[in-house]
Amino acid sequence: MAKLDAELLLHAYGSGLFPMALDGDEYDDSDADAEETAERSEIGWFSPDPRGVIPLDEFHIPRGLKRVLRKKPFEMRVNGDFAAVIDGCADRSETWISADIRNSYVELHERGFAHSVESWLDGKLVGGLYGVSLAGAFFGESMFSLVPEASKVALVALVERMRERGFILLDTQWSNDHLTQFGCREIPRDDYLAQLTEALLLPVSFVDE
């Protein structure tokens, strides 16, 4: 399968859908023949019911993380190295981020719709997250961490940025134990779609245009 069309991706997110590679192939970003890898990938489209979200007004920072934040151990950047963040998220034994998925989101980033929030330490990228931004909604995709707490600090930075810029919907797709500690909860898909419709009407932006 070829790289996903950017307009198709944006339409899908605006309709409550998101893609994932289904074959679980190990992704190797050093593979020179990315097109061959992409052709092996099958893409599935998902719209979970219930849907995982983190209500911004209910976002919770665990006590231990608060102590870390007070020390300000990382330099935080937005879109400093988007490609490296998605590669970091894909660097695991099994991943849904196939080569075609990776290249599609890099294109979305180049078009101003996909963004990364990053933790840097001593000039090196050590963790972060990425997702897609449409109007007042941010669709979180994945995160990674090379040192303790790096991805968690990036999540805090993401929420702070969303609050500052008037966003109202942080979509996590599903909920899990890791996200629950931050206030993530599941809501019926119909409720999610209603929140999404409201968010898409907001004239806000994740970055200055």
Image (cartoon, helix red, strand yellow):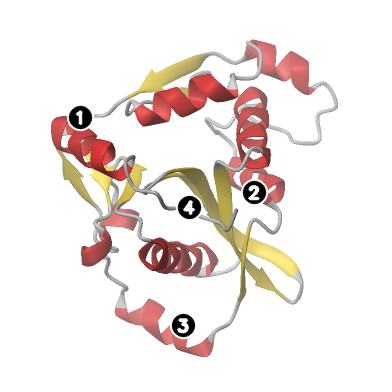
Q: Residues within 10 Å of mark 3 (few under 14, many from 20)?
A: some
Query: Foreground: 83 or 167?
Result: 167
Q: Which residue is mark 4?
A: 205
Label pair 2/3, CB-CB below 8 angstroms: no
| Residue name at image x 77 percent, y 23 percent | 34
Q: Which numbered mark, 1 or 2, is in the foreground of this view?
A: 1
If you read the primary sequence from the N terminus, does the residue marked by circle 2 or circle 4 appear first?
Answer: 2
Mark 4–mark 1 distance (CA, rounded to whole Å): 27 Å
Q: Amino acid at mark 2?
A: Gly
If you read the primary sequence from the N terminus, does the residue marked by circle 4 or circle 3 appear first?
Answer: 3
Mark 1–mark 3 distance (CA, rounded to whole Å): 35 Å
Mark 4–mark 3 distance (CA, rounded to whole Å): 29 Å
Mark 2–mark 3 distance (CA, rounded to whole Å): 22 Å
| Residue name at image x 34 percent, y 56 percent | 178
If you read the primary sequence from the N terminus, does the residue marked by circle 4 or circle 1 appear first?
Answer: 1
Q: Which residue is mark 2?
A: 88
Mark 1–mark 2 distance (CA, rounded to whole Å): 28 Å
Q: Residues within 10 Å of mark 1 (few under 14, many from 20)?
A: some
Q: Amino acid at mark 1?
A: Asp
The kind of secondary structure element at disc 4 is loop
Relative height, residue 100 to residue 133 (above, below): above
> Which of the 4 quarters of the picture holds residue 92?
top right
Q: Which numbered mark, 4 or 3, is in the foreground of this view?
A: 4
Q: Which numbered mark, 4 or 1, is in the foreground of this view?
A: 4
